[in-house]
Image: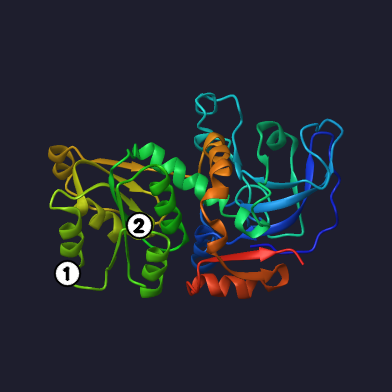
Amino acid sequence: MRLETVDIPQVGEGDVLLKVRASGICGSDVRSYVNGIEERYKIPIIFGHEVTGEVVAMGSRVQQLQLGERVVVAPIYGCGRCEFCLLGLENLCDEVVVFGCTLDGGYAEYMLIPEKGVERGVLVPLPSSLSDEAGTLIEVVSCCLHGQRRAGLKPGDKVVIFGAGPIGLVHLLVSKKMGAGMVGLIDFIPQRLRDAQKFGADFVVNASDSEWRKQVLQILGNNGASLVITAAPTVSSIEYALQLVRKGGTVLIFGGLPAGNTLSLDPNFIHYREVNVIGSIDATLEDFYRAVQWSPYLGLERFVTHRFSLDRVLDAMGVAVKKEGLKVVLVAE
């Protein structure tokens, strides 16, 4: 992870320079900080893909933005030419650019958005009702929305979410927004389960209880959940998800796992029960734009529990590693 004070870089005719106002610390950043850099990270790199900023310079060809405008950054964009981009699936592009992973991100004073990203539409005006810090949650909303759209969540569905951290709580809000009939969260940490209740969960279950699976099925009914989302980066959450999903239901593998993990399962369980197992990574630009529209109505300010200046990034990481509070954000001084 590279962290430094930089001189204002030269801005090309189609580029935009942002003064970073806030950058959220994501679970994937924490995982890479603790376990070592993952394969998708191009080293050396400045972390930070949950970013809000202010336009402080732009090239002569940039017409859609104004100096001083607050924006939120859609952190990925594709080549715009391949079969995936033409289908609107830039997150699957072989040449995908991910700020904070393959291109310098928001753990810095300034962030340069290259012409290609500007053309692809990665800079979106931040709703005036949102603070800079709350705006960093928009990227999280877009990813959860993308996953649930892929999973085909329908109004009235019963949803179970493994993990009641920031990602799990955003999944809770998105599920409710999409019309889920019942949403429950499972976690080991009592404070996070209390947070889930405050955020509107219909039920919470502590996984440290030896009878927790029985409790969940008593609440859902013996058929199980329509959709089970693994927002916890563990193999066991996926294995347990398969035990809680109903016939014809869907398991959404959302939380990324450290490299080297493997999953053992009985394929007949999926075959005879017609269970769908799908994955989700990042979000499309369409999902991001919709997340921006939804963001003023989701109460995102509630997530931000810790704020640190850029020069205290290691302290911020320490809080995130210990899972203290909910969202940890680096803010401009």
Q: Secondary structure at mark 1?
A: loop
In the image, 207 versus 85, the foreground residue is 207
In the image, 229 versus 97, the foreground residue is 229
At which x and y percent is residue 141? 50, 49
**Within-10-Å neighbours for mark 2: few <14, some 14–19, many 20+:** few
Q: Secondary structure at mark 2?
A: loop
Q: What residue do we see at 40% from left, 38% from top?
A: 149
* Type of the residue with mark 1: Glu
- Is residue 155 in sight in this rendering? yes
Q: Dividing the image into 4 quarters, which one contains the N terminus?
A: bottom right
In the image, 15 versus 215, the foreground residue is 215
At which x and y percent is residue 184? 30, 57
Q: CA distance from mark 2 to mark 1?
A: 26 Å
Q: Are marks 2 and 1 in contact (CB under 8 Å)?
A: no
Q: Is residue 189 above or below residue 257?
A: below
Left or right, 47 with respect to 171, comes to right
**Within-10-Å neighbours for mark 1: few <14, some 14–19, many 20+:** few
Question: Which residue, given by chain and number where applicable, does mark 1 sit on?
Answer: 211
Q: What residue do we see at 16% from left, 38% from top?
A: 271
At which x and y percent is residue 148? 39, 42
Question: Which residue, given by chain and number where applicable, does mark 2 sit on?
Answer: 261
Q: Is residue 237 above or below residue 269?
A: below
2 or 1: mark nearer the eye: 1
Q: Mark 1 or mark 2, which is nearer the start of the sequence? A: 1
Q: Dividing the image into 4 quarters, which one contains the C terminus?
A: bottom right
